[in-house]
């Protein structure tokens, strides 16, 4: 079960904007309209306000903590984060799995949109790759 709601429009991204009072309409930043809709698309109730749910920004130390828990599964997370692993200068035999995972995460960290460089984005990729230990580590870091 996901810890985060998915955007009701694209169903890919984590919802960061919720509209009140009904809370049926939850959108990601990409799908969120600049102007608040007048009515909920699901129940038709008048929308009175919008709440942005922030996600803590990641730091390099967070990446290392996650890499330590990923082990050899780092490549699966790379797929969900959209990291092209062929561009990483990693020789499978030359360095340990933690360093490989860290290099992949750092590549994502450096090249992704700063607005998506969050615990929520990384947690969603870890969840998709079923890397529970790394996901739990990230949850502890966010507190």
Image (cartoon, helix red, strand yellow):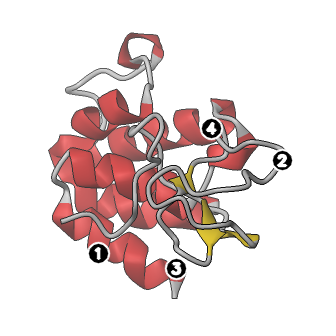
Q: Residue at x 68, y 44 (%)?
A: 32
Residue 70 falls in image quadrant: bottom left
In three-dimensional space, the C-alpha distance between marks 3 and 4, rounded to whole angstroms, equals 25 Å
Residue mark closest to the camera, 3 vs 2: 2
Residue 96 falls in image quadrant: top left
Callout 3 secondary element = helix
Give the left or right position of residue 23, taking residue 12 as reference: right
Callout 1 secondary element = helix
**Badge 2 local density, few (<14 within 10 Å), some, or many (20+)?**
few
Residue in the foreground of this view, choosing between 81 and 17: 17
Dot 1 or dot 3: first in sequence order is 1
Residue in the foreground of this view, choosing between 130 and 40: 40
Dot 2 or dot 1: first in sequence order is 2
Residue 51 falls in image quadrant: bottom right
In three-dimensional space, the C-alpha distance between marks 1 and 3, rounded to whole angstroms, equals 10 Å
- The residue that mark 3 highlights is 142
**Badge 4 local density, few (<14 within 10 Å), some, or many (20+)?**
some
Residue 136 marker: 1
- The residue that mark 2 highlights is 35
Callout 2 secondary element = loop
Give the left or right position of residue 129, taking residue 15 as reference: left
Tell me, yes or no, whether the two marked residues, 2 and 4, touch with CB atoms within 8 Å.
Answer: no
- In the rendered image, the vertical position of residue 23 relative to residue 128, given as above or below: below
- The residue that mark 4 highlights is 31
Callout 4 secondary element = loop
């Amino acid at each position: 079960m996901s810890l985060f709601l998915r955007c009701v429009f694209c169903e890919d991204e984590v919802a960061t904007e919720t509209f009140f009072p009904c809370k049926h309409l939850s959108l990601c930043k990409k799908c969120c309209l600049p102007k608040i809709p007048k009515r909920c698309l699901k129940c038709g109730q008048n929308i009175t306000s919008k709440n942005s749910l922030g996600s803590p920004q990641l730091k390099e130390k967070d990446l290392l903590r996650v890499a330590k828990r990923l082990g050899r599964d780092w490549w699966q997370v790379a797929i969900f984060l959209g990291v092209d692993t062929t561009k990483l200068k990693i020789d499978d035999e030359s360095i340990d799995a933690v360093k490989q995972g860290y290099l992949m995460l750092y590549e994502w960290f450096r090249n992704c949109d700063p607005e998506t460089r969050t615990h929520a984005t990384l947690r969603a990729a870890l969840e998709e790759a079923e890397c529970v230990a790394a996901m739990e580590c990230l949850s502890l870091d966010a507190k």
